[in-house]
Image (cartoon, helix red, strand yellow):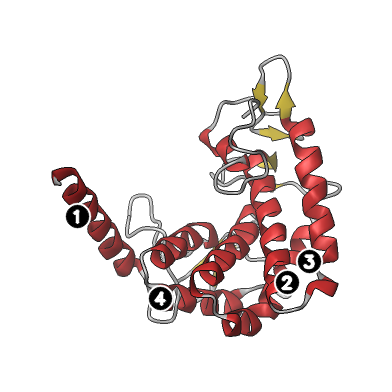
Amino acid sequence: VERRKKYIDTCKRSLLTIFMLCNHDGGIIASPSLYPDYRYVWNRDASYMSVALDLCGLSPMSEKYFDWCKKTQNSDGSWIQNYYIDGKPRLTAMQNDQVGTTIWAALVHYGITHNKLFLKRHWNMIKKAANYLAKTVEPPSPCYDLWEERFGVFAYTVGAIYAGLKCAYSMSKAINKIEIAEDWKKTAEFLKKEVPKRFYLKDEERFAKSINPLDKTIDTSILGLSYPFNLVDVDDERM
């Protein structure tokens, strides 16, 4: 009983923290931290918090975030590195994992709410993002990693791209838009087949952090291949 109470208290404190980061127009800042300053919206961070809100039964707040995403999306379907909370661009580098994570979080939202109107209202956003992701796959488009430290082709990034494409395809089926989504399915299947081959280090018996350039650093971001994006099965012995 005491352990359960501790978990509930921790969850409540976490939710209160997320509430403090949410703007009434939908933007969710990464952290109130000043040193370093994280009072900005990264789609990656905000999408994870959106999932937390959905899982805890606070879907209306999550839906506001996707309205914010629809307003801030670039014409090519991408989102930039980060934004001021009102949606104005701040840093304009590209991190393709953020695009995939946003679409993955949208499917989580739909899976919990079963609200097809949400999909229809955001379909153009989902379609543009998936088309953008499909263009980054072959040849692999380099971008900055999730830590914003290096430029290359990263395991975490391709995991998020895979999830974004697969989730966009799933949402297309839910609203009978599947005819324009077949390419996303094929591209996701290509990633499922090719990425483990390209990233696996046979001598080390594990996956690389990045290829092109090759980075063999053991980094927690490599887990993104499996969790939460499921490009490589969690029980795959290579993982």
Question: Residue placed at 69% from the left, 46% from the top?
Answer: 158
Question: Residue placed at 35% from the left, 67% from the top?
Answer: 21
- Residue annotated with mark 1: 9
Residue farthest toward the left in the current orientation of the protein: 2
- Residue annotated with mark 2: 173
Quadrant housing residue 9: bottom left
The one of 199 and 40 positioned closer to us in this rendering: 199
Residue farthest toward the top in the current orientation of the protein: 203
The one of 22 and 161 positioned closer to us in this rendering: 161
Whether residue 126 is visible, yes or no, is yes
- Residue annotated with mark 3: 131
Q: Hey, what amino acid is under mark 2?
A: Lys
Disc 1 versus disc 3: distance between alpha carbons? 42 Å
Disc 3 versus disc 2: distance between alpha carbons? 16 Å
Disc 4 versus disc 2: distance between alpha carbons? 25 Å
Q: Hey, what amino acid is under mark 4?
A: Met
Question: For the residues carrying marks 3 and 2, which lies nearer the camera in this image?
Answer: 2
Disc 4 versus disc 1: distance between alpha carbons? 21 Å
Question: What is the x, y in percent for residue 24?
Answer: 38, 81
Disc 1 versus disc 2: distance between alpha carbons? 39 Å
Quadrant (top left, top right, bottom left, bottom right) of the C terminus: top right
Question: For the residues carrying marks 1 and 2, which lies nearer the camera in this image?
Answer: 2
> Looking at the image, do the residues carrying marks 4 and 2 touch, with CB atoms under 8 Å apart?
no
Quadrant housing residue 79: bottom right
Question: Residue placed at 38% from the left, 50% from the top?
Answer: 36
Question: What is the x, y in percent for residue 222?
Answer: 59, 36
Labelled disc at residue 197: none
Question: What is the x, y in percent for residue 195?
Answer: 76, 38
